[in-house]
Image (spheres, rainbow, N blue to C red):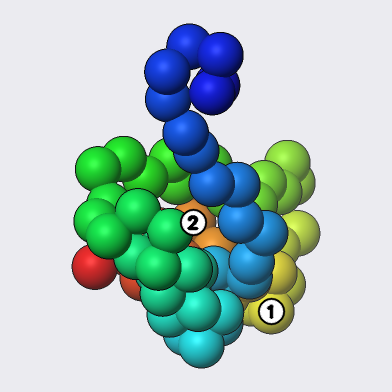
Amino acid sequence: MKDLGADALAYKLDVRDDESVENMVKATMDKFGRIDILINNAGALWWKNVVDTPMKRYDLINGINARGTFNCTR
């Protein structure tokens, strides 16, 4: 990216973990001083019928796909 005149920060984290998200935001602010773009590409899939889906799996999927996306965006 630097060859194109841009800089980026890749950051590995668990979007379900509030502290991990806060650390990501801090690292971004420390490096750039602001956030212009967030690529929210975390996601969980489960290709089974609803009747074959345990609530623990449902909670995991929603924790990543809904709560995690919201957590990073806020």
Give the residue displayed 50% in from the left and 38% down from the top: 8
Q: Which mark is residue 10?
A: none
Residue drawn at (54%, 46%) of the image: 9
Q: Nearer the viewer, residue 21 or 6?
A: 6
Dot label at residue 56: 1
Residue beneath disc 2: 65
> What count of labels does the image hold?
2
* Amino acid under disc 1: Lys
Q: Residue at x 75, y 59 (%)?
A: 52
Measured in 3D between alpha carbons, the distance from the residue under mark 2 to the one under mark 1, in whole angstroms, is 14 Å
Apparent side of residue 72 relative to residue 7 in the rendered image (left or right) = left
* Figure check: 41 above or below 73: above
The front one of 74 and 8 is: 8
Q: Quadrant of residue 56?
A: bottom right
Q: Nearer the viewer, mark 2 or mark 1?
A: 2
Relative horizontal placement of residue 35, taking residue 52 as reference (left or right): left
Mark 1 surroundings: few (<14), some (14-19) or many (≥20) residues within 10 A:
few
Q: Is disc 2 in contact with disc 1, using a CB cutoff of under 8 Å? A: no
| Residue at x 48% of width, y 68% of height | 27
Q: In the orientation shown, which residue stands out farthest toward the bottom?
A: 19
For label 1, the SS is helix
Above or below — where is 68 with respect to 49? below
Determine whether 59 is above or below 9 in the image.
below
Query: Picture coordinates of residue 53 (x, y %)?
Result: 70, 63
Which is nearer the eye, 60 or 6? 6
Q: What amino acid is found at the position of numbered circle 2 in the picture?
A: Asn
First reached walking from the N terminus: tag 2 or tag 1:
1
Q: Quadrant of the C terminus?
A: bottom left
| 65 with respect to 50 (left or right) | left
Image quadrant holding the N terminus, namely top right
Pinpoint residue 12: horizontal percent, then vertical percent: 67, 59
